[in-house]
Amino acid sequence: MDRIYYITLLLDFYGELLTEKQRQVMSGYYFDDCSLNEIAEEHSITRQAVQDMIKRSEKLLEQYENKLMLVDKYLYRVKLKDEIIREIEAHMEKGSEALLHIKALVEHITD
């Protein structure tokens, strides 16, 4: 899995457990595509401090995931949903309203 995608998932699930400043720095770096220098300037800290905060925050998020496994469980549900949809589509007869309804329900599992 792409590291950036994984970190953004960790932020989605555990971001509220970080301090406000950690959240702002991580959000700027991962969601807003800001450079280290831009973040440093915005928060009146050094580029090295930003880099250190990102590394510490990533490590903290990974520790939360190792204990709670919320991202892992979410990714497993997404995988199962995709498999169910493939099976439904493979067995769906043209115009089968029941299977279309089931497929629509399954697609909302991870929304």
Image (cartoon, grey):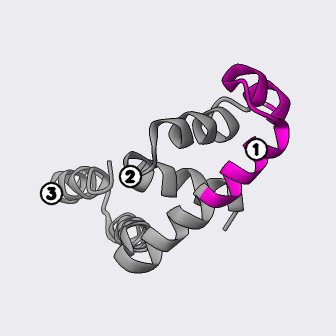
Q: Position of residue 36 (x, y in %)?
A: 81, 36
Secondary structure under the numbered disc 1 in the rendered image: helix
Dominant secondary structure (helix, strand or loop) of the stretch shown in magenta: helix
- Please say if 104 is above or below 1: above
Q: Earlier in the sequence, mark 1 or mark 3?
A: 1
- Quadrant containing the N terminus is bottom right
* Residue 103 shown in magenta: no
Decide: few, some or many residues near mark 3? Use Cα within 10 Å; few <14, some 14-19, many ≥20: few
Secondary structure under the numbered disc 2 in the rendered image: helix
Residue extent of the magenta highlight? 35-56
Judging by the rendered image, the residue that carries numbered circle 1 is 49
Q: Amino acid at mark 3?
A: Ala
Judging by the rendered image, the residue that carries numbered circle 2 is 17
Q: Earlier in the sequence, mark 2 or mark 1?
A: 2
Residue displayed at 53% across by 64% down? 60
Q: What is the C-alpha distance between the residues marked 2 and 1?
A: 20 Å
- Please say if 18 is above or below 31: below
> Seen in the image, is 50 located left or right of residue 77?
right
Q: Position of residue 70 (x, y in %)?
A: 36, 68
